[in-house]
């Protein structure tokens, strides 16, 4: 068996070979600047970008003109949040978000807070999901934006975004969804979600890193101000030459992910359940964080599991298992030794939060790898806990 075994697909995914095949000609034989309007190279490049937008739009039920290409979901989140704030409000207003959001949402909100904005951070329930009734009670006359993720990057918990979107529409507040972890893994479309703004990332769905998109509703048009300056690209919202090869890669990746989603979701869910059974049989006091998969499998990402061994810090276990590519939370904060802000917001005690290990299976993950990983995890946990007296 080839080692190490990669079990960190929530952090990033390899580029799909078919996606790479579509991208390669764009770097040499079919290169060109999509903004060059006076020759064939520019015309061809522009057609490729338009086709990529069409594929992205089709995958999420949007219109082509509603897709703004970005460098990734982080930039898309910043554009959505800061763009709303700068466009519509001369005086600071209020933004509603969640305590368990990714730092790419929490940090722009913190930036606005320093500028005088009021940020309401909604608490999750014990499963890590935001209750629509909690949202409804928080919306006020000064609320400029609601920004809540579709799927949590650590626990895999899915927010009830359709119900949340219905509240936002009823109360007339723009609704932004960070869907970086959801698109291509679970059914998602902008209409049923009631979304006005949606962030997407290429490298989370077997596309290239360095590219993403922001859906900006066109009917009615959601007004945004740019946060970067230097040209009229992307409808004036995102300056700089459009990276045509990356756009092609994102379009191909999201199309492939959506087409194969149902089959891959069932396979990934089976792998995670296989891992859970194996770990439980070896370590009866195994901790599982987030949604109860046995009762509500539809409320969580199929291929994500956040678990822990009582009394054993995740950092210690991961150091002891170089054969496995694991994570103790978000890749953006995996070097921090503080407990997960997601788990703490869910009410998980600090000592238990320190045990959390995230596994994200992907297209390349095989059953025999899951079996081997379970043996390694359980064996290391027994040795380390015995050594510490736990």
Image: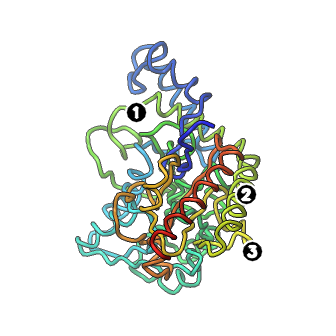
The residue at 63%/48% (across/down) is: 184
239 in relation to 154, above or below: above
Answer with mark 1 or mark 2, whichever residue precedes in sequence.
Answer: 1
151 in relation to 50, above or below: below
- Kindly indicate the quadrant of the structure image that contains residue 351: bottom left
Q: Label 2: few (<14), some or many (≥20) within 10 Å?
A: some
Viewer-proximal residue, 22 or 373? 373
Answer with mark 2 or mark 3, whichever residue precedes in sequence.
Answer: 2
Viewer-proximal residue, 187 or 330? 330
Number of numbered tags placed on the structure image? 3
Coordinates of residue 316 in the picture (x, y in percent): 42, 62
Q: Mark 3 points at which residue?
A: 295
Viewer-proximal residue, 107 or 228? 107
Coordinates of residue 338 in the picture (x, y in percent): 35, 70
User: Secondary structure beneath disc 3?
Assistant: loop
Coordinates of residue 134 in the picture (x, y in percent): 54, 84
The residue at 52%/53% (across/down) is: 180
Coordinates of residue 102 in the picture (x, y in percent): 43, 63
Q: Mark 2 points at which residue?
A: 274
- For marks 1 and 3, give the CA distance: 45 Å
Answer with mark 1 or mark 3, whichever residue precedes in sequence.
Answer: 1
Q: Label 1: few (<14), some or many (≥20) within 10 Å?
A: many
Q: Are marks 1 and 3 in contact (CB under 8 Å)?
A: no
- For marks 2 and 3, give the CA distance: 16 Å
Q: Label 3: few (<14), some or many (≥20) within 10 Å?
A: few
Q: Mark 1 points at which residue?
A: 242
- Kindly indicate the quadrant of the structure image that contains residue 190: bottom right
31 in relation to 383, above or below: above
- For marks 1 and 2, give the CA distance: 43 Å
Q: Which mark is residue 334?
A: none
User: Secondary structure beneath disc 2?
Assistant: helix
The residue at 50%/48% (across/down) is: 325
């Amino acid at each position: 068996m080839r080692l190490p075994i990669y079990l960190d697909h929530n952090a990033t995914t390899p580029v799909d070979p078919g996606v790479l095949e579509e991208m390669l000609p764009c770097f040499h034989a079919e290169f060109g600047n999509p903004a060059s309007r006076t020759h064939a190279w520019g015309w061809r490049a522009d057609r490729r970008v338009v086709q990529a937008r069409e594929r992205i739009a089709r995958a999420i039920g949007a219109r082509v003109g509603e897709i703004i290409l970005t460098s990734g979901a982080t930039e898309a989140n910043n554009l959505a949040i800061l763009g709303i704030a700068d466009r519509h409000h001369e005086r600071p207003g209020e933004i509603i978000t969640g305590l368990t959001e990714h730092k790419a949402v929490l940090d722009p909100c913190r930036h606005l807070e320093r500028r005088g904005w009021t940020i309401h951070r909604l608490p999750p329930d014990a499963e890590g999901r935001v209750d629509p009734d909690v949202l409804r009670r928080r919306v006020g006359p000064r609320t400029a934006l609601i920004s809540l993720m579709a799927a949590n990057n650590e626990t895999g918990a899915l927010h009830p975004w359709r119900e949340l979107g219905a509240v936002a529409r009823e109360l007339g507040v723009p609704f932004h969804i960070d869907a970086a972890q959801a698109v291509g893994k679970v059914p998602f479309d902008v209409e049923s979600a009631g979304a006005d703004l949606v962030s997407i990332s290429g490298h989370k769905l077997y596309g290239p890193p360095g590219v993403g998109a922001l859906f900006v509703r066109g009917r009615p048009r959601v007004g945004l101000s740019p946060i970067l300056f230097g040209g009229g690209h992307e409808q004036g919202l995102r300056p700089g030459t459009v990276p045509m090869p990356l756009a092609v890669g994102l379009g191909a990746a999201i199309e492939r992910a959506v087409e194969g989603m149902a089959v891959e979701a069932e396979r990934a869910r089976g792998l995670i359940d296989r891992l859970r059974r194996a770990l439980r049989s070896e370590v009866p006091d195994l901790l599982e964080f987030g949604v109860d998969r046995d009762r509500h499998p539809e409320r969580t990402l199929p291929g994500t599991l956040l678990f822990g061994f009582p009394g054993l810090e995740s950092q210690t276990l991961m150091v002891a298992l170089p054969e496995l590519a694991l994570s103790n939370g978000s890749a953006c904060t995996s070097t921090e030794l503080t407990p997960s802000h997601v788990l703490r917001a869910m009410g998980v005690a600090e000592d238990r939060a320190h045990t959390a290990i995230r596994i994200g299976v992907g297209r390349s993950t095989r059953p025999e790898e899951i079996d081997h990983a379970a043996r390694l995890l359980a064996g290391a946990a027994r040795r380390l806990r015995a050594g510490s007296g736990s």
